[in-house]
Image (cartoon, rainbow, N blue to C red):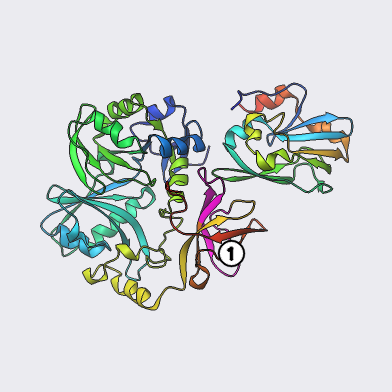
C-alpha cells in the first residue's frame, strides 16, 4: 500500500464500491474505484447501454453575493453572463500569463453559481478564487463535502434516470432540480465526460445510497475511473494534469472556443496574444498505425509530447493526444512516437477519435 | 476471466512469473495474480527469437488498457520461440495465463537457477 494511504478520502459510496467488487486506487488524495469487472467491459457498457460513475472526488465551489456574476466573469474564461437560469457552461480558469489552472463546468444555482472543479485542483482553485475575490461583494464556499456526484452515461442513461425522476430531465447543458429515486432536491445536469448522452447528478450525501442502488437495480453498470479515462479520450475531452496544465494555455489546448477575451478575464491579454500570433504547438489527437500504445510523457519525434494515450476499446488501436508543432498537426500527418525507446508509428487524426456514426 | 489458480507443476518467480521446466527448455508466462493486477491485456511486446534473457531482468512488456508493465525473466537463457498467438489475441494472457497465454520458450543457460524459484505453495503464500 502506498505511503500515506491511511489519509486517503473516501466517497460516501465507498461501501457500495467494495460490494460491487471495485479495485480501489489512490487518485488525487481519494480512494477511488478504477474498475469493477474490467475497463473494457465497463467502457462498452457505457457506449451501448448505461454506466454509472461515482465522481464525488470532484469538487464544487459555490459563489454567492451581489457580485457573483461579475466576479466569475473575471476568473473564468467563458462569458458567464450567457449562462441561462437553468444553464451550464464550460470554461477554463487561467493565471495572468494564460496558463491553465483548471477546466470547469459552471451552473447557475439559485441566485449564485456552482462550479465543478477537478479533484486534484480543488484546494488550489478555492484558494485562487478567494484571493481574486478581494474587492468583490461575493462569498466563495467550499461545497465539496456537500455533494455526491454521479455521472450516468450511455444511450440508455437518460431513459433510466427519467424513470426514477419526478420531473422532466433537463436538455443537454441544462439543469433542473427534482426528486430522483425518492431523494428530493437532486440537481440534474445534462452534462458528461464520455461522449454519450446522459446526465450528472449532484446529490446530498445522505441520499446517495438510495440513488446508486436504484440505478444499479435499473441496470446501470458501475463504471470506474479507468473506463472514464478511455471514454473521454476516444472523444478527445481534456484531462487536467494530462492535456491541460499551468505551463500551457487554452489556445494551444484547442480550448479557444471557451475563451471570450472581451470579458476581461484573468489571463485574457495573454490568451489574445497567442490567439493572434498562433501557438507554436497545438494539442492534436493521434491514432497508432502500427503496434504499441503511446502513453503520457512519450516524446514525439520532431518535437512535442504525448499527454494522454491508451488502448481504445471501441477502435481496437492505440489512441491519444499530443502537443505537436502546429505545422505537424494536420490530420493525416505521419508521426513517430518514442515509446520507451522504440519508435512507434502513428498518424495525426481528427476529433473525435471515435464517433457513433462511423 | 479464469478463477485464481497456481498449478503444482510450475515454478514461480516472486515477480509473478511462472516457468514450466522441460529438461533444459522452459516456457515462461505470468501468473494469474499478475494478469489480475494488470487487468485486460491489450498488447504484448515480446523479445526476438535468439535474444538472451537474464534471470530477474525485464525481457518483455505487457500493456493493459491502463498501463504498461515489464515482465521479468524467471530464468536465464536464449529465446527459442515466442507465442505468436498473442499478437492477435493478447487477452489469452487473461483467459488462460498458464496455457495459451504463455509468452516465450527459452533454452536455459544455467538450469541450476531453477532451484531458486518458488514452489506453488511458497509463491501462493507470498500473495497474502
In the displayed structure, B24 sits above or below A131; it is above
Q: Nearer the viewer, residue A96 or A3?
A: A96
Q: Nearer the viewer, residue A233 or A140?
A: A233
Tell me which secondary structure the magenta stretch mostly adopts: loop
Which structural element holds mark 1?
Answer: strand
Please give the residue where the numbered disc 1 appears in the rendered image: A334
Q: Residue furthest bottom?
A: A277
Q: Residue at x 35, y 57 (%)?
A: A102
> Seen in the image, is A112 located left or right of residue B86?
left
Q: Residue at x 58, y 35 (%)?
A: B37
Q: Residues within 10 Å of mark 1 (few under 14, many from 20)?
A: some
In the displayed structure, B10 sits above or below A306; it is above
**Chain ID, mark 1:** A
Q: Position of residue B14 (x, y in %)?
A: 70, 34
Which span of residues is magenta-colored?
Answer: A294-320
Q: Position of residue A329 (x, y in %)?
A: 50, 67
Q: Position of residue A35 (x, y in %)?
A: 47, 35
Q: Residue at x 72, y 45 (%)?
A: B46
Residue A214 in sight here: yes
> Seen in the image, is A50 located left or right of residue B30?
left
Amino acid at each position: 500500500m502506498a505511503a500515506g494511504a491511511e489519509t486517503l478520502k473516501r466517497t460516501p459510496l465507498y461501501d457500495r464500491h467494495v460490494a460491487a467488487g471495485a479495485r480501489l486506487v489512490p487518485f488525487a488524495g481519494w480512494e477511488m474505484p478504477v474498475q469493477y469487472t474490467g475497463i473494457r467491459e465497463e467502457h462498452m457498457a457505457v457506449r451501448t447501454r448505461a454506466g454509472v460513475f461515482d465522481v464525488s472526488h470532484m469538487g464544487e465551489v459555490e459563489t454567492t453575493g451581489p457580485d457573483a456574476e461579475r466576479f466569475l466573469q473575471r476568473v473564468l474564461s467563458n462569458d458567464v453572463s450567457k449562462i441561462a437560469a437553468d444553464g451550464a457552461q464550460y470554461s477554463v480558469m487561467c493565471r495572468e500569463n494564460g496558463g491553465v489552472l483548471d477546466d470547469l463546468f459552471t451552473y447557475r444555482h439559485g441566485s449564485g453559481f456552482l462550479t465543478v472543479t477537478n479533484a486534484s485542483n480543488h484546494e488550489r482553485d478555492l484558494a485562487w478564487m478567494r484571493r481574486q475575490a478581494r474587492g468583490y461583494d461575493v462569498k466563495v464556499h467550499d461545497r465539496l463535502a456537500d455533494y455526491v456526484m454521479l455521472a450516468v452515461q450511455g444511450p440508455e442513461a437518460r431513459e433510466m434516470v427519467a424513470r426514477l425522476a419526478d420531473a422532466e430531465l433537463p436538455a443537454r447543458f441544462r439543469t433542473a432540480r427534482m426528486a430522483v429515486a425518492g431523494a428530493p432536491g437532486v440537481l440534474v445536469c445534462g452534462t458528461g465526460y464520455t461522449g454519450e448522452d446522459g446526465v450528472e447528478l449532484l446529490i446530498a450525501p445522505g441520499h446517495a445510497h438510495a440513488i446508486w442502488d436504484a440505478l444499479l437495480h435499473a441496470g446501470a453498470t458501475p463504471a470506474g475511473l479507468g473506463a472514464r479515462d478511455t471514454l473521454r479520450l476516444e472523444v478527445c475531452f481534456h484531462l487536467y494534469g494530462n492535456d491541460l496544465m499551468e505551463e500551457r494555455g487554452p489556445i494551444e489546448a484547442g480550448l479557444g472556443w471557451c475563451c471570450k477575451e472581451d470579458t476581461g478575464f484573468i489571463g485574457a491579454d495573454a490568451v489574445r496574444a497567442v490567439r493572434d500570433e498562433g501557438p507554436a504547438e497545438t494539442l492534436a489527437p493521434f491514432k497508432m498505425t502500427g503496434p504499441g500504445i503511446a502513453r503520457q510523457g512519450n516524446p514525439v519525434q520532431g518535437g512535442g509530447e504525448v499527454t494522454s494515450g491508451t488502448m481504445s476499446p471501441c477502435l481496437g488501436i492505440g489512441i491519444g493526444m499530443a502537443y505537436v508543432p502546429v505545422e505537424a498537426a494536420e490530420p493525416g500527418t505521419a508521426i513517430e512516437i518514442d515509446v520507451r525507446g522504440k519508435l512507434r508509428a502513428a498518424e495525426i487524426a481528427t476529433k473525435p477519435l471515435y464517433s457513433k456514426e462511423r | 476471466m479464469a478463477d485464481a489458480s497456481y498449478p503444482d507443476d510450475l515454478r514461480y518467480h516472486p515477480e509473478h512469473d511462472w516457468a514450466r521446466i522441460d529438461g533444459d527448455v522452459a516456457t515462461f508466462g505470468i501468473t494469474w495474480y499478475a494478469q489480475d493486477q494488470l487487468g485486460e491485456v491489450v498488447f504484448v511486446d515480446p523479445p526476438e527469437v535468439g535474444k538472451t534473457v537474464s534471470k530477474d531482468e525485464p525481457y518483455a512488456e505487457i500493456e493493459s488498457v491502463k498501463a504498461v508493465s515489464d515482465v521479468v525473466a524467471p530464468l536465464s537463457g536464449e529465446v527459442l520461440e515466442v507465442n505468436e498467438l498473442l499478437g492477435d489475441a493478447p487477452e489469452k494472457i487473461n483467459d488462460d495465463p498458464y496455457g495459451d497465454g504463455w509468452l516465450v520458450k527459452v533454452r536455459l543457460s544455467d538450469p541450476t537457477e531453477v532451484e531458486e524459484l518458488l514452489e506453488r505453495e511458497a509463491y501462493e503464500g507470498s500473495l497474502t
